[in-house]
Image (cartoon, helix red, strand yellow):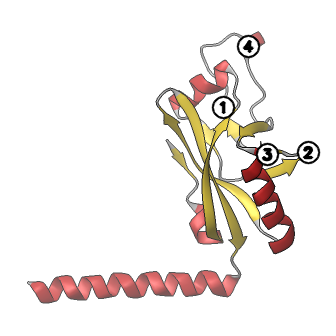
Amino acid sequence: MTTNRKVKYNFDIIETLEAGIVLKGTEVRSLRNGSVNISQAFCKIIKGEIWLINSQISHYPFAGISLQHNTTRDRKLLLNKKEIRRWNLDVDRKRLSIVPTKIFFSKRLVKIEIALVRGKRKYDRRQSIKNKEAEIEIKRSLKRSMF
């Protein structure tokens, strides 16, 4: 449904997990409309629970004013305690971060894919762009030589 494209450009992805997310009714309806932004979002572990911070889910236009939700509120993610503890150790020891990569529906439930990442430096980004361009050029030359 929604992907965070900047994750692969700005970070090295080490590991990914699929988690549930605690939402209100109007938030689920807004997600079904596709009005969500996770490009500035990140995850934080607070008191043994993992929270999605700074994600933006727009208001549902057909709900009353009293039913509307706060668009940028913190949302709790549902993971096993073992997974949370393991990721918390990695975040603390290895100086890693947790960011959302995509939000999607699995049957009728809203799921979020989160990634344990390490930030890329500027020269790492340049190097990855050069590698991608080289791969594209190799594919083009192979395609031309076949015909």
- Tell me if mark 3 has few (under 14), some (14-19) or many (20+) residues whose alpha carbon lies within 10 angstroms of its own: many
The answer for how far apart the CA atoms under marks 2 and 3 are is: 8 Å
Residue at 63% in and 84% down: 124
Quick one: which residue is furthest to the left in this view? 147
Chain-order first, disc 2 or disc 4: 2
Tell me the SS state at disc 4.
Answer: helix
Q: Single out the mark in the foreground, 1 or 3.
A: 3
Q: Residue 86 at what x, y percent from top left?
A: 77, 59
Q: Single out the mark in the foreground, 2 or 4.
A: 2
Disc number placed over residue 58 in the picture, else none: 1
The answer for how far apart the CA atoms under marks 4 and 3 are is: 26 Å
The answer for how far apart the CA atoms under marks 1 and 2 are is: 28 Å
Q: Which residue is mark 3?
A: 50
The answer for how far apart the CA atoms under marks 1 and 3 are is: 22 Å
Chain-order first, disc 1 or disc 3: 3
Whether residue 129 is visible: yes
Q: Residue 129 at what x, y percent from top left?
A: 51, 81
> Is there CB contact under 8 Å for labels 2 and 4?
no
Q: Which residue is mark 4?
A: 67
- Tell me if mark 1 has few (under 14), some (14-19) or many (20+) residues whose alpha carbon lies within 10 angstroms of its own: many
Disc number placed over residue 80 in the picture, else none: none
